[in-house]
């Protein structure tokens, strides 16, 4: 009786020959050679006191001058299957063994040991093996039996059984299994063949001979009810309708066993059985080969949206203050003027009145909407997903993005555009009057670290509390990548950078990319969303409408909101802008390792400096470096110039050893 071959679930080295452990011991080739072919338990984290921790078994293979390899097999327990998923997903990558009866010589070479089990472990050693021996006393020059156990970690990633190639899988079969597989493929292909059917007049003698005497349910003339697609390996009924017999797949002659074997072997080499069939189509007389392969299937039930990043929309909109009326009137009294200060009194003098100005502004509501339509025929014909719900979803989140954009930046349309959201109805924070939004101007050539310093120094003009910094990914990354003279980053996360900027949070806003105020590039908008007020009366909230136009057979959809929005207190926001300038892009200096010569290029608007001394370097070849000497060079924008965001403008060059 032939034994069933079970494919191992994964493999890995239990031990490696010649690896030195942290205590100086080395595993020899002979240490576990006698374990070749033995099966030992596969457990979890060396825990032996619970049978649920037994995950299966490992079959050991001694590899001369290499180590002991473990082919591991999971059992069907829940714990084992869970561990199998962890291994397949890559969450668990390391093996460890538990061994006892260890013997070593005076050179600290482990000569013999008994493996008791193999364990899946969360982490292996950094390099090689790690053997934790306890209470070992050495004899003088002799071989000692170590009574204490050891845990041996290889630190080598596991290998999944799924990594086997098709050729390896086929070669691992017995000759009988290979013949059976090829016979099944041949049978499947030939069962898909037609025999050059006529239109049913019975004149085709081959048809008559081939179907003569066959059972009704196995002939090529099937009833219309048998139209389901079948597995090509399925034997028995051929489920093709009689009206579809002209759709031939194979010629009448079929394929020989050798032809099938050739196609199979070439498919393994090519990595695709389909490609092999196509390659041999003319040679073996295969027609309409595409019928053997399934139709393409969509991975998603409905189209996937391609959008800008939307996280900032919810952060801004949910953070704003909402009021139940749509006409917002704000009144302020400026007490910062000298005339509003309290005064000292001199006996006998007339006391003076104080003076201060009261200002107000009113913001009226604006309707923001999105409108769509669909032909009813399309709604009826599209059955893969609910297109109406899908369309409402698009309209809703695009309306909210437009509202958030109008609040933070303005919609960006020209003033005479009929679709523009008027900035007197929803007042954009970044573009608001200086009375409400403070403008902090930084130089064109400000460095990322200089930008942080400017923001902190300019914070005294901001009167809000707990602000959020809205900025593009490019501006944020520029600051995150700032390094000291040793190449260490100042800030390792957005949270650390937020702390440095003295803001509650950093929020990336894609629509701020390239945004300008007064011809100056906006770097960030600093505001507490709670200081911005959004007003709407009953009925002005986001509302959906739909209607059917009987004349054109169309469903029409409308989603809209009627709101107003404004900052109502002075200096409750701050916009940081960089003065207008000219874009300059640094060129990397050239370096010849053999001579150690660095050559500084000439680039308009770019200044090159020694990063250690901050000394400006002249263009041209520099003094050669000594062997193993290094130099770090950085590029900074000249006055009136600036660099593109996310540009690496510092380099380190090292001359190799002689």
Image (cartoon, grey):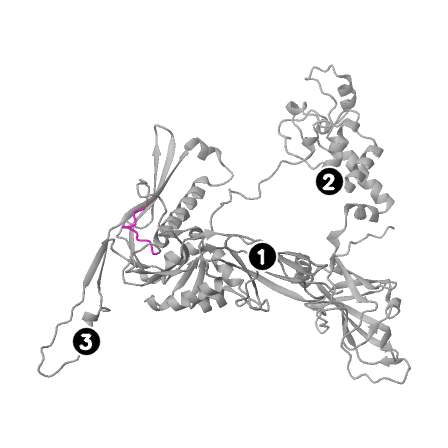
Give, as a single range, the part of the protein colored magenta. 421-429
- Circle 2 residue: 272
- Counting other residues with Cα less than 10 Å from the Cα at mark 1, is it few (<14), some (14-19), or many (20 or more)? some
- First along the sequence among labels 3 and 2: 2
The answer to whether residue 562 is magenta is no
Magenta span includes 426: yes
Query: Which residue matches tag 3?
Result: 342
Q: Is mark 2 on a helix, strand or loop?
A: loop
Residue shown at 78% from the left, 42% from the top: 268
Viewed as shown, does residue 631 lie left or right of 527?
right
Mark positioned earlier in the residue sequence (3 or 1)? 3
Look at the numbered discs 3 and 2 and tell me whether their residues touch, using CB distance below 8 Å: no
| Residue 552, label in figure | none
Is residue 204 visible from the viewing direction of this image? yes
Q: Are marks 1 and 2 in contact (CB under 8 Å)?
A: no
Q: Based on the displayed image, in which of its 4 quarters is residue 122 positioned? A: bottom right
């Amino acid at each position: 009786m032939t034994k069933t071959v079970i494919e191992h679930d994964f493999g890995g080295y239990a031990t490696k020959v010649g690896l030195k452990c942290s205590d100086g011991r080395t595993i020899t080739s002979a240490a576990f050679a006698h374990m070749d072919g033995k099966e030992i338990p596969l457990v979890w984290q060396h825990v032996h006191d619970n049978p649920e921790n037994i995950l299966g078994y490992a079959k050991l293979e001694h590899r001369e001058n290499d180590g002991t390899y473990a082919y591991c097999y999971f059992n069907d327990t829940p714990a084992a299957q869970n561990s199998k998923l962890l291994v397949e997903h890559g969450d668990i990558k390391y093996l460890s063994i538990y061994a006892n009866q260890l013997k070593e010589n005076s050179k600290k070479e482990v000569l013999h040991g008994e493996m008791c089990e193999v364990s899946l472990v969360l982490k292996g050693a950094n390099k090689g093996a790690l053997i934790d021996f306890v209470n070992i006393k050495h004899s003088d020059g002799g071989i000692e039996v170590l009574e204490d156990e050891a845990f041996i970690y290889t630190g080598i990633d596991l290998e999944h059984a799924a990594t086997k190639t098709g050729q390896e899988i086929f070669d691992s079969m017995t000759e009988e299994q290979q013949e059976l597989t090829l016979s099944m493929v041949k049978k499947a292909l030939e069962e898909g063949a037609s025999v050059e059917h006529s239109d049913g007049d019975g004149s085709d003698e081959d048809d008559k001979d081939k179907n003569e005497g066959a059972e009704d349910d196995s002939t090529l003339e099937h009833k219309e009810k048998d139209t389901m697609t079948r597995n090509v390996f399925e034997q028995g009924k051929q489920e093709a309708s009689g009206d579809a017999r002209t759709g031939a797949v194979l010629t009448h002659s079929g394929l020989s066993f050798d032809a099938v074997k050739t196609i199979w072997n070439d498919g393994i080499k090519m990595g695709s059985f389909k490609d092999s069939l196509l390659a041999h189509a003319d040679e073996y007389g295969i027609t309409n080969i595409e019928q053997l392969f399934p139709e393409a299937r969509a991975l998603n039930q409905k189209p996937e949206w391609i959008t800008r990043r939307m996280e900032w929309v919810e952060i801004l909109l949910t953070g704003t203050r909402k009021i139940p009326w749509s006409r917002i009137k704000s009144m302020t009294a400026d007490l910062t003027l000298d005339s509003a200060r309290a005064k000292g009194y001199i006996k006998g003098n007339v006391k003076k009145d104080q003076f201060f100005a009261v200002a107000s502004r009113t913001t009226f509501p604006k309707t923001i909407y999105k409108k769509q339509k669909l032909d009813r025929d399309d709604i009826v014909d599209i059955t893969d997903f609910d297109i109406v719900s899908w369309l409402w979803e698009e309209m809703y989140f695009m309306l909210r993005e437009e509202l958030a954009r109008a609040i933070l930046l303005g919609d960006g349309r020209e003033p005479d555009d009929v679709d523009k959201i008027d900035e007197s109805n929803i007042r954009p924070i970044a573009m608001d009057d200086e009375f409400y939004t403070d403008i902090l101007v930084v130089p064109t050539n400000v460095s990322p670290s200089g930008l942080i310093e400017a923001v902190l120094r300019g914070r005294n003009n901001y009167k809000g509390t707990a602000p959020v910094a809205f900025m593009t990914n490019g501006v944020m990354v520029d600051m995150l990548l700032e390094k000291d003279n040793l190449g260490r980053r100042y800030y390792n996360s957005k949270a650390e950078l937020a702390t440095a900027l003295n803001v509650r949070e950093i929020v990336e806003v894609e629509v701020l990319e390239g945004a300008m105020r007064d011809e100056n590039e906006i770097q960030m908008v600093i505001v507490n969303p709670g200081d911005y007020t959004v007003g709407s009366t009953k009925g002005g909230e986001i509302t959906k409408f739909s209607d059917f136009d009987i004349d054109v057979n169309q469903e029409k959809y409308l989603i809209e909101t009627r709101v107003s929005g404004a900052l109502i207190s002075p200096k409750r926001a701050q916009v940081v802008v960089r003065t207008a300038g000219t874009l300059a892009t640094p060129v990397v200096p050239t370096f010849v390792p053999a001579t150690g010569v660095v050559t500084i290029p000439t680039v308009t608007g770019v200044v090159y400096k020694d990063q250690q001394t901050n000394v400006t370097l002249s263009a041209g070849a520099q003094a050669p470096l000594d062997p193993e000497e290094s130099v770090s060079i950085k590029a900074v924008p000249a006055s009136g110039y600036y660099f593109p965001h996310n540009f690496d403008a510092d380099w380190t060059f090292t001359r190799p050893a002689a």
